[in-house]
Image (spheres, helix red, strand yellow):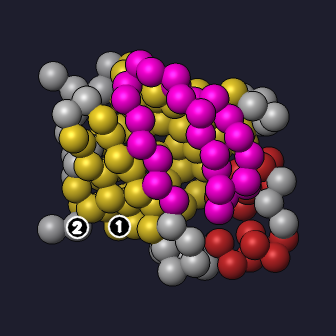
Amino acid sequence: MPTSFCGTWDMVSNVNFEGYMIALGISAYLRKIALKLKLKKVIEQQGDQYIVKTLSSLRNYTIIFRVGEEFAESTQGLDNRHVKSLVKWEGHKLVCEQIGEKKNRGWTHWIEGDKLHLELYCEGEVCKQVFKKNT
């Protein structure tokens, strides 16, 4: 049985977020604002469908997917691109590959202890975020 990611998670660390945003082509102005944000993740599962919300005081972003089913994703509010995304299980990690204008783009979520880890990657840049479950 895969690990449950469900819950509300508060960010505790965010390493190389700026490098990741530069790889995405996000403007210096927006990067400066985004670096000050403390993100919150809300992850829900309804049957075989996952709903992942990334919340901040600036923008919110929601992704809805089923593991193993490719879907069209609009990264509206992030870098405003259209990608084809596919999320799959690799052991106890949820891994997403995003095919589009940017090369080697995607993310990986996993849990270690009481922490939710997220690695975001694009064109050789890797951002490592860690979240703690909000109790």
Q: Is residue 81 above or below residue 129?
A: above
Residue annotated with mark 1:
10
- Residue 134 badge: 2
Real-space Cα distance between discs 2 and 1? 6 Å
Is 58 part of what is drawn in magenta? no
The residue range painted magenta reads 61-86
The image quarter containing residue 64 is: top left
Residue appearing at x 65%, y 72% in the figure: 34
Is 71 in front, or is 29? 71
Q: Is residue 16 visible?
A: no
> Are dots 2 and 1 in contact, CB under 8 Å?
yes
Is 84 in front, or is 56? 84
Is 63 part of what is drawn in magenta? yes
Q: Mark 2 belongs to which amino acid? A: Asn
Q: Earlier in the sequence, mark 2 or mark 1?
A: 1
Q: Mark 1 belongs to which amino acid? A: Asp
Q: Is residue 5 above or below residue 17?
A: above
Residue 42 in percent (x, y) is at: 32, 59
Residue appearing at x 65%, y 56% in the figure: 76
Whether residue 117 sits left or right of residue 23 in the image: it is left
The image quarter containing residue 3 is: top left
Q: Is residue 64 above or below residue 68?
A: below
Residue 79 in percent (x, y) is at: 73, 54
Residue 43 in percent (x, y) is at: 30, 51
